[in-house]
Amino acid sequence: MVPPQPRRKGIVLRTTTAHWFPVASALLLVGWGANQFASLLAFYQQQHGFSQLAVTSMLGIYVAGLIPALLLGGRLSDALGRKPATFAALAMTVVASGAMVFGPWAPTMLFVGRFLAGIATGVAMAAGSSWVKELSQPPWDERAGHNSGARRASLFTTAGFWLGPVVSGLLANYAPAPEILPYLFHIVLCLPLMLLLAKVPDVVASAPAATTPNIASHYAYPDGGRRFWRVVAPGAPWVFGSGTLGFAVVPALLTGLGDHVLLYSTAAVALTLGAGVAVQALARRVDSERSAAATLTAISTTVVGLLIALMTALTQFAWLGLLASTLLGAGYGLILVAGLSETQRLSSSRALGRNSGQFYVLAYAGFLAPTIWAFAAQWFEPLQLLLAVLGLGVVSLLTIAVNSQKFLPARALSSTGESA
C-alpha cells in the first residue's frame, strides 16, 4: 500500500535537514584541532625541555596561517564552492595532527602542524560557516529559523574550541602516550567525518546561474557595507577579546592565589569557554533584522563582565573573578552569533564566504588583547588598564547603539516604517 503523502514529506524533510550537521561537525573538529595544543604547553616544557619562547612561537605561527586563510579561504569558496574548501580544511587538520605526533622528536613538526592548523581553521571558519548557513534554509532545511545557520556554525565552532583543550588535557594527564594519543584521537574522529562530508551537496556549485546575484557589490543591498562597518565591525574584536580577557587576564588580577593559581586558571578557562557555548541559545531569541539587539546585548554583557573584573581587582575576591570570566565568556559567545548572523544577512550569496572571512579577521584581532595588556602593563597599573578597556567597551556599545536601526534592508525598514 502506498504511504500517505504527509508521511513521505516528513521523510524527505528529515533527510534534507541532516545536511548541515556533517558540515557543522567539521567546524567542531577543526576548532578542536586548533586548540588541542593549548593544554599541552606545560607538558612540552616540563617533559621535553621546550623553552617558553619555543611554545609561544608555536602559538604565534598558528596566527600566521590563520589570517591569510580567513581572507582567501572565503573568497575561494565563493568562486569554487564550499565543499572543496571545507573538505580541504578537514583534511588539513588531520595532516596537522599527524605532523604534531612527531613533535617531541622533531620540534620542527610542531611548527608545521600549528601552521597547518591555522590554515585549516581559517578556511573552515570562512567556508564552512557559509556552507552551514546555506544548508540551514529552504530547500535544504524547511524548519530552520532566520539565524539558524549562524547559530549552528558558531555553536559547533566554539564547542570545538572548548572540547579540544579539555580532551587533550585529560588524555595527556591520565592516558598513556601523552605525546601521541591526543593527536591520534583527533585524527580518528576526523576520518569517518570526511566520508560523510563527501556526500553533502555543494550549495554554491549547484546553485542555478539565474539565481546568482551580481557581486559588483558584495552585499545583498546597497547600504549593506555601511551597516557592516558601523554595526558589525565595532563589535567583532570583542568576540575573542572578551574570551581572552576572561581566561588570560582576569586570573592575573588576583595576587593571593598561591599554589592554587593553576587550578584557578583552569577553572577560568572552563567557565569562559563553557559560557560561550551555553549562552548561544539566547542570541536566537534577541536577534532581529530590524535592529542590532543581539549585538547590543552581547557588548553589554561584556561591559558588565569588565565592571566585575574591575571589582575583582579592587576587592581580591576570587569568586568575583570567576563571575567576571563567566560573563566575559557569555559576551564572547553572544557576539560571535550576533556578528555572524548580521554578516550573513548583509552578504550576497556569492560573497558570503568573503564577508564571513572578513568578519572573522576582525574577530581574531581580539586575540591581541592579552599581548597588548602585557606590553602596556610595563607602564600602567591593572586598574588603569581595566578602566581603559572598559572605556573602549562603552565606546563600542554607543557606536553600535547609534547605528542600530540605520542602513537596514528594505524588508526590515518596511516592517518598522523607517527610512534609510
Image: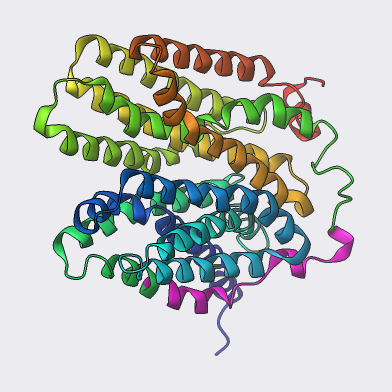
Q: Is residue 343 visible in this depiction of the protein?
A: yes
Nearest the camera: 107 or 295? 107
Nearest the camera: 413 or 315? 315
Q: Which residues are magenta?
A: 189-211
Residue reaching furthest to the left: 259
* Left/right of residue 269 with respect to residue 202 in the rendered view: left
* Left/right of residue 385 with respect to residue 226 in the rendered view: left
Quadrant position of residue 11: bottom right
Where's residue 230, x and y in %?
A: 70, 24
Quadrant position of residue 192: bottom left
* Left/right of residue 408 with respect to residue 157 in the rendered view: right
User: Is residue 201 highlighted in magenta?
Assistant: yes
Quadrant position of residue 308: top left
Dominant SS of magenta comes to: helix
Image quadrant containing the N terminus: bottom right
Nearest the camera: 182 or 302? 182
